[in-house]
């Protein structure tokens, strides 16, 4: 090729030359035949390396994407766990407050019932005491009443039924 280029005719006023097309094509064919199989194999290896590199890049991108998705899910799970813990704490706090209120209400109700019961017991005890006093009066001996002449007259004690004395 060098000798063809050196012996080629120059075009006037330029650095261009006119080459014999048939001679150049024959040289290219000879070069193709003369290229060792290692060069062709090297070209195939280079192409295969490019495909392998591209496939590895795609798989690496897929791995990174899956890792990012998993990390996002883990963060989401963590946030959900924290939210669940916070909600559980709120529920427990509300339940504790409600339990205190219910206990207070129950205590107030019980106190009211006991106060009413105490009043009823006091009424019952008062009636019982009146009944006992009335029975005591019935068992006392008759006391004579002295009149102006100092004469003893018997006194009649009113006899009420026991039931009326027990009523409040």
Image (cartoon, rainbow, N blue to C red):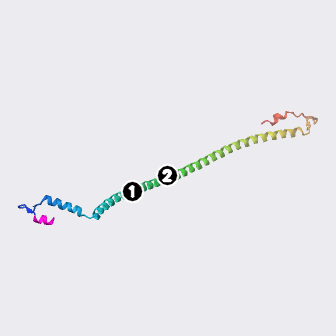
Observer-nearest of 157 and 42? 42
Quarter of the picture holding the C terminus: top right
At horizontal 11% and vertical 66% (from top left) the residue drawn is 6
Disc with the residue nearer the chain's start (2 vs 1): 1
Observer-nearest of 129 and 27? 27
Q: Is residue 6 magenta?
A: yes
At horizontal 84% and vertical 35% (from top left) the residue drawn is 162
At horizontal 81% and vertical 36% (from top left) the residue drawn is 166
- Residue ranking furthest to the left: 12
The kind of secondary structure the magenta stretch mainly shows is helix
Disc 2 from disc 1: Cα separation = 31 Å
Observer-nearest of 69 and 58? 58
At horizontal 64% and vertical 47% (from top left) the residue drawn is 103
Is 34 left, or right, of 141 in this rendering? left
Image coordinates for residue 19, horizontal then vertical, percent:
12, 60
- Residue 10 location, quadrant: bottom left
Q: Which mark is residue 80?
A: 2
Q: Which mark is residue 154?
A: none
Observer-nearest of 101 and 20? 20
Image coordinates for residue 136, horizontal then vertical, percent:
87, 40
Q: Is residue 14 magenta?
A: no
Quarter of the picture holding the N terminus: bottom left
Image coordinates for residue 124, horizontal then vertical, percent:
78, 40
Query: Relative to residue 33, is residue 160 depicted above or below?
Result: above
Is 101 left, or right, of 165 in this rendering? left
Q: Assess disc 1: are there few (<14), some (14-19) or many (≥20) residues with their C-alpha within 10 Å of its C-alpha.
A: few
Mark toward the viewer: 2 or 1: 1
Image marks 2 and 1: residues in contact by CB distance under 8 Å: no
Helix, strand or loop for disc 1 = helix
Residue marked by disc 1: 59
- Residue 131 location, quadrant: top right
> What range of the chain is rendered magenta?
1-7
């Amino acid at each position: 090729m060098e000798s063809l280029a050196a012996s080629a005719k120059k075009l006037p006023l330029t650095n261009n030359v006119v080459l014999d097309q048939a001679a150049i094509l024959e040289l290219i064919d000879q070069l193709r035949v003369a290229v060792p199989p290692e060069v062709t194999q090297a070209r195939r290896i280079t192409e295969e390396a490019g495909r392998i590199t591209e496939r590895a890049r795609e798989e690496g991108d897929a791995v990174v994407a899956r890792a990012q998705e998993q990390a996002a899910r883990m963060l989401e799970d963590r946030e959900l766990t924290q939210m669940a813990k916070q909600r559980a704490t709120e529920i427990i706090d509300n339940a504790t407050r409600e339990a205190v209120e219910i206990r207070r209400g129950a205590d107030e109700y019980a106190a009211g019932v006991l106060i009413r019961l105490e009043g009823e017991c006091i009424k019952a005890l008062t009636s019982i005491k009146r009944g006992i006093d009335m029975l005591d009066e019935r068992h006392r001996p008759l006391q004579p009443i002295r009149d102006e002449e100092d004469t003893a007259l018997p006194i009649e004690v009113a006899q009420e039924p026991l039931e009326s004395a027990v009523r409040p």
